[in-house]
Image (cartoon, helix red, strand yellow):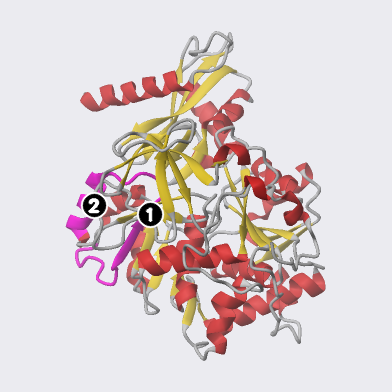
């Protein structure tokens, strides 16, 4: 480790011991970063100093910021953080907003001031927000003024959060306008100082905080961005994933900024909104999930999308039928990929010209991948097994015993079952844990179960993913009701509304089946695999007629 610039040692003290880290292969990836590097300076200020400050950097619904204008906003917010709010390097800052220019500005201001950004999804409820506040010991939050209500409720649940400063209503903006705030020298952070903590749901339903360094944000740009995506400074990037997802952070912000291109940020990214924004802003690089590509097919304008040239698909398995339909409609081959919050971004993907429909692809240059059995031993090509990977980025959980599960013998081992063919291409088979991936969102079945069990009518329940033609998978709940309650349409709606109000609405069960009993082991443990098999069979029967 290098000498940290963090005055608040929380992150260093809560990293897993180095013996539990994956094998981080920077030299093998051809990466060599200086000991001191601040990613905000590297991705924004560097372009200004190089004379490219007039180039467009961030494009929103109402305004476009050049690199120079973006840099000044970052500086002003960084000064507010340090001078007015007392932030010191290493402090964690919770961020909450839809995808818009100010969210990126506050994100980079935290990084430039040596802080640690903890971005959260706009749809999260108070109870879900309280967890990262408690886990990461967060005292300060910067929040879009339209989204403060749930955060204020979370503060009541977790008073560790001492200050919420809103933006968009003038609160932060008034402080930013102070004289002398236009310049800010980036904190000289170490390349391995933590700069972001991304929270991801695990199979137990309790989120895991993944800790990433300043150099990690550059590494994904210099591996996937430079060697697979191969975009140009003239490109305009656009997409649907929230910036709290590292898929969105990389695709919409980091990759364009690394090469001096522009990112287009839209708050509403449903298929019609996304298509309109692609046309309106002349976007050329698109990041979204297979579900969105399918949904856009019958909404494509007659003239097509002439500015679009690169389309990246991730977040869930890409069906071959979707690949073929999109290519037929647009002439563009979807670039499939698999990433993980633990790895920060995509680590398997084929570049244009080497894509095989139905396959996720090959390891991104700088990364290695293999298929292993339950004991971590490599299996022959053509044999299903767990996907294991290593490279310049990797899993470092925030004070979490599950580090031992995800990292084995230096390899990151995902919850995905894959097959590798003789040519080295990887083919997705299924999830090997209780995670449900629906329309690109990761949903932990046990978390939905916990929400349902809080309803007074529910005695027991089991939640699994059910195949779905539109969303890839949907959340299906099997529910045993308490005596005196009836499993009718009214109860279905009541339970769905309860979950929507309790946790993020996208996690609600789209189908609910009322059953007399759940399948269990002799020790009373829920057999989710039996429910998964039942859901698959029900899907097949419904599809057959």
Q: Which residues are magenta?
A: 301-329
Tag 2 near tag 1, CB within 8 Å = no
Q: Residue at x 52, y 91 (%)?
A: 51
Looking at the image, residue 369 lies above or below residue 386? below
Of the numbered discs 2 and 1, the one sitting upstream in the chain is: 2
**Residue 329 on image: x %, y %:** 19, 57
Indicate yes or no whether the magenta region holds residue 538: no
Looking at the image, residue 508 lies above or below residue 11? above
Q: Residue at x 34, y 73 (%)?
A: 282
**Residue 241 on image: x %, y %:** 46, 55
Q: State the residue lying farthest toward the bottom.
A: 51
Looking at the image, residue 398 lies above or below residue 492? below
**Residue 342 on image: x %, y %:** 54, 49
Q: What numbered label is drawn on residue 356?
A: 2
Along the viewing direction, whichever of 356 and 237 lies nearer the viewer: 356
Along the viewing direction, whichever of 286 and 203 lies nearer the viewer: 203
Indicate yes or no whether the magenta region holds residue 303: yes
Residue at mark 1: 363
């Amino acid at each position: 480790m290098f000498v940290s610039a963090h005055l608040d040692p929380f992150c260093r003290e809560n990293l897993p011991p180095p013996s539990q880290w994956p094998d981080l292969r920077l030299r093998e990836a051809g990466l060599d970063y200086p000991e001191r590097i601040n990613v905000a300076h590297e991705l924004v200020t560097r372009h200004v100093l190089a004379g490219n400050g007039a180039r467009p950097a961030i494009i929103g619904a109402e305004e476009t910021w050049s690199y120079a204008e973006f840099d000044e906003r970052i500086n002003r917010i960084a000064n507010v953080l340090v001078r007015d709010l007392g932030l010191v390097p290493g402090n964690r800052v919770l961020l909450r907003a839809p995808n818009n220019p100010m969210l990126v500005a506050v994100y980079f201001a935290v990084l430039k001031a040596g802080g640690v950004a903890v971005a959260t999804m706009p749809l999260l409820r108070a109870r879900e927000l309280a967890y990262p506040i408690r886990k990461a010991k967060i005292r300060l939050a910067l929040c879009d003024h339209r989204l403060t209500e749930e955060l204020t409720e979370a503060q009541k649940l977790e008073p560790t959060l001492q200050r919420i400063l809103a933006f968009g209503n003038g609160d932060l903006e008034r402080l930013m306008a102070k004289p002398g705030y236009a310049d800010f020298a980036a904190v000289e952070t170490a390349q391995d100082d933590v700069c972001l903590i991304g929270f991801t749901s695990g199979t137990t339903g309790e989120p895991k905080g993944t800790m990433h360094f300043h150099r990690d944000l550059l590494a994904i740009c210099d591996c996937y961005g430079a060697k697979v995506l191969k975009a140009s400074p003239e490109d305009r990037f656009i997409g649907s994933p929230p910036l709290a997802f590292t898929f969105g952070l990389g695709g919409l912000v980091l990759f364009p900024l690394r090469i001096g291109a522009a990112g287009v940020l839209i708050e509403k990214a449903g298929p019609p909104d996304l298509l309109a924004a692609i046309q309106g802003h002349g976007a050329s690089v698109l990041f979204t999930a297979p579900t969105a590509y399918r949904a856009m097919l019958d909404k494509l304008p007659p003239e097509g999308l002439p500015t679009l040239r690169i389309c990246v698909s991730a977040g869930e398995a890409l069906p071959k039928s979707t690949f073929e339909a999109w290519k037929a409609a647009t002439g563009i081959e979807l670039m499939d990929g698999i990433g993980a919050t633990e790895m920060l971004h995509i680590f398997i993907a084929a570049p244009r010209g080497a894509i095989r429909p139905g396959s996720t692809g090959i390891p991104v240059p700088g990364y290695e991948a293999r298929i292993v059995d339950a004991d971590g031993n490599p299996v022959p090509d053509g044999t299903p097994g767990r996907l294991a990977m290593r490279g310049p980025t990797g899993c470092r959980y925030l004070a979490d015993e599950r580090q031992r599960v995800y990292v084995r013998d230096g390899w990151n081992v995902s919850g995905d079952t894959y097959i590798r063919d003789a040519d080295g291409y990887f083919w997705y088979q299924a999830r090997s844990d209780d995670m449900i991936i629906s329309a690109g969102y990761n949903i932990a079945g046990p978390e939905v179960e916990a929400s349902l069990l809080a309803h007074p009518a529910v005695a027991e329940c089991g939640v699994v993913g059910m195949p779905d033609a539109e969303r890839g998978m949907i959340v299906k709940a099997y529910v045993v009701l308490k005596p005196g309650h009836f499993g009718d349409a009214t109860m279905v709606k009541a339970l769905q509304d309860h979950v929507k109000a309790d946790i993020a609405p996208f996690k609600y069960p789209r189908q609910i089946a009322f059953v007399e009993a759940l399948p269990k082991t002799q020790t009373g443990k829920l057999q989710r695999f039996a429910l998964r098999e039942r859901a698959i069979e029900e899907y097949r029967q419904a599809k057959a007629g």
